[in-house]
Image (spheres, grey):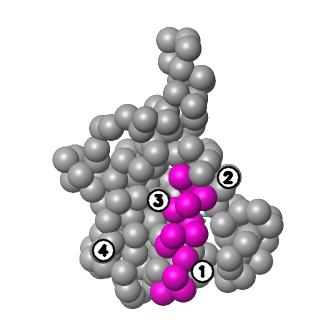
């Protein structure tokens, strides 16, 4: 099982898309291990997007991400990182394929509704930037054995 850090960005919250987006992840079979509504502190936004520090869009990106409430989610599942990125779609709303979250709900480059970790290393760092250990819950959904083939040693 893998965990990934998802952020429903301020545009998703302001546009009333929290439910629609979370529903997609739930229906796919990803499990919610952590979830909260918060305003991202400046320092946390700067750390989170530190890999983009030299990019021209960085200051605007940090301003955007701290401009209002976001929903942060820890999603769990086999290959959760890749699955979530695929459901999100390409970075720019104008380029993202129909059927993806960004492709269906947005047109902007910066205001693209959602963040998802892009590697296990990033996920590990990002999850603990936004969540305390005790905020990530270990629980087994009763439907797990219908989401995965659990007849072998591990979920397939
Ligand atoms: P990702 O969110 O798909 O991983 P990244 O390249 O990591 O995309 O960029 C981080 C975020 O920075 C994007 O989600 C988007 O909000 C913003 N961003 C990326 N490239 C641009 C750009 O060229 N102009 C404006 N904003 C951008
Ligand atoms: Mg990225």
Within-10-Å neighbours for mark 2: few <14, some 14–19, many 20+: some
x and y percentages locating residue 123 in the rendered image:
43, 48
First-in-chain label (4 vs 3):
3
Q: Relative to residue 131, is residue 52 depicted above or below?
A: below
**Residue 20 seen in the figure:** yes
- Within 10 Å of the Cα at label 3, are there few (<14), some (14-19), or many (20+) other Cα atoms? many
| Main secondary structure along the magenta-highlighted residues | helix
Q: Mark 1 and ligand 1: say if the CB distance to the nearest ligand atom is below 8 Å.
A: yes
Residue 21 lies within the magenta run: yes
Which circle's residue, 3 or 2, is located before the other in the chain? 3
Where the C terminus falls, by quadrant? top right
Identified at 29% across, 52% down, the residue is 128
Q: Is the residue under label 2 in contact with that under label 4 (CB below 8 Å)?
A: no
Q: Position of residue 84 (x, y in %)?
A: 58, 51
Which region shows up in magenta? Answer: 14-26
**Is tag 4's residue or tag 2's residue first in the polypeptide sequence?**
4
Q: Earlier in the sequence, mark 4 or mark 1?
A: 4
| Between 42 and 11, the one nearer to me in the picture | 11
The numbered mark at residue 86 is 2
Give the secondary structure at mark 3. Answer: strand
Q: Disc 1 vs disc 3: which is toward the camera?
A: 3
Q: Secondary structure at mark 1?
A: loop
- Ligand 1's image quarter is bottom right
Q: Which mark is residue 38?
A: 4
């Amino acid at each position: 099982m893998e965990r990934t850090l998802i952020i429903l960005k301020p545009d998703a919250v302001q546009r009333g898309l929290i439910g629609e987006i979370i529903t997609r992840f739930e229906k796919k079979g990803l499990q919610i291990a952590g979830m909260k509504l918060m305003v991202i502190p400046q320092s946390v936004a700067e750390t989170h997007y530190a890999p983009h520090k030299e990019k021209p869009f960085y200051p605007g990106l940090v301003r955007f991400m701290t401009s209002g409430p976001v929903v942060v989610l820890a999603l769990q599942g086999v290959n959760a990182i890749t699955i979530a990125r695929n459901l999100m779609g390409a970075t720019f709303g104008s380029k993202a394929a129909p059927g993806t979250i960004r492709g269906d709900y947005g047109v902007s480059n910066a205001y693209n509704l959602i963040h998802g970790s892009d590697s296990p290393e990033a996920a590990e760092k990002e999850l603990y930037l936004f969540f305390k250990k005790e905020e990530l819950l270990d629980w087994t959904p009763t439907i797990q054995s219908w989401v995965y083939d659990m007849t072998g040693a591990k979920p397939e």
